[in-house]
Amino acid sequence: MKAVVQRVTRAAVRVDGQTLGAIERGLLVLLGIGKSDTPATSDWLIKKLLALRIFPDAAGKMNRSVTDISGGLLIVSQFTLYGVLEKGTRPSFSTAMPPAEAEPLYHDFMARLRAATRLPVAAGRFAALMEVELVNDGPVTIMLETPQSVVGQASRLSSLPTHHQTGETPVPLFQPFDPHAPATIAMRHLPHWEQAGCTFFVTFRLADSVPADLLCQWEALQPKPEFPEQFYQWLDQGHGQCLLRQPALATMVEAAMLHFNGDRYFLGDYVIMPNHVHALVTPCGAQELSAILHAWKSFTAKIVNHALGLTGKLWQDESFDHIVRDEHALEKFSAYIRGNPQAAGLRIGEYRAGVGQASCLSPLSEGGQAGRLSH
């Protein structure tokens, strides 16, 4: 990645006369994404931006960062930073990442930056014709480029084979439910089982994802089924605004889920649908599933509402969660998650899906249970 970083007293970016983002004192960052960039290069650049000491201290020396001064950051995508003029006078952009690949990485960068700081973060619009207005303070302008050592390491890691690519069985991070070990049950509208070390299949949804008449049908249903397949079918019908159909918003949710993966929990298969999320997750140590879900929803509600200029409730308070009882159940849940977009008739770009480490123990066969949770 390349970045032109300018120390500013104010800056703003506009599209068609509309101001999309503006800051007072802080950093204006023109961001270019190259062909070899990955989320790992994003992390390097974000750490550098937040710690870059180019603001004056009491003695007038450059010794303070944007974090130290509680400033703002305005990020503007600019692929022309990768222009090459070795021959002729018309730049070539062959080393820039193609737009279709760069846009998800740009949105991922923004989500990671917002997750890494409480400072105000504003942005332009990817691939739009933008007008940028600024007052450079100094002037001070710094050029940053991800070192080849970071790019090379990230490329090697991203090229390692995964179980999706090879069909090989990964080392499982799965512990089935133990009927003889202590377990707790919390009740709200739904029962919520917890047992230390267990893997869970969780579903959380946007507040407007199920219409009131269908909710009434669900409330009247007694007894409730252990696996609410009818409810999941209602979710797949695409009710509500389906905000997560927007790639930028779905990427924010994905980045939040991946942020503490391997630290507070192990994330298995997951899919971010237009109005709901399914995931397999195994809490680590004393971490509680309820706390993990609360952190995901509270943080993403804040950044999604901020991005849309909205306030109010984003997620439905209560989530569905099921303890994965055995390897057979794990395979079924994994297959359901992977098959959910196709079962709901979604096209590429209308959802985000991936896998962490708590993955199923055998490759999914052609005749698997994708898209259904029959038992």
Image: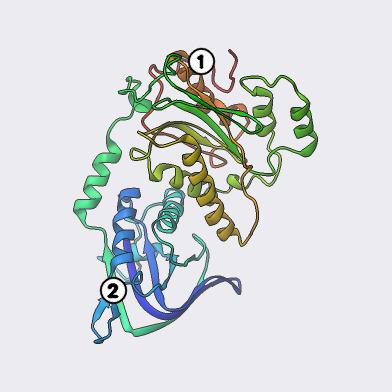
Question: Which residue appears at 64% of the width and 59% of the height?
Answer: 311
Residue at disc 2, secondary structure = strand
Indicate the secondary structure of the residue bearing disc 1: loop
**What amino acid is labelled 2 in the image?**
Ile
Q: Position of residue 215 (x, y in %)?
A: 75, 34
Quarter of the N terminus within the rendering: bottom left
Q: Which residue is mark 1?
A: 368
Type of the residue with mark 1: Gly
175 versus 134 height, above or below: above
Characterize the local packing of mark 2: few (<14), some (14-19) or many (20 or more) Cα atoms within 10 angstroms. Answer: few
Is residue 139 visible to the viewer in this orientation of the structure?
Answer: yes
Q: Which residue is under mark 2?
A: 142
From the viewer's perspective, tell me whether residue 372 is left or right of residue 105: right
Q: Nearer the viewer, residue 4 or 70?
A: 70
Residue 287 or residue 170, whichever sits in front: 287
Query: How far, Cα to Cα, is label 2 from label 1?
Result: 54 Å
| Residue 8 at x, y percent in the picture | 39, 79
Measured from the top left, where is residue 268 in percent x and y? 42, 30
Coloration of the structure image? rainbow
Q: State which quadrant residue 72 falls in.
A: bottom left
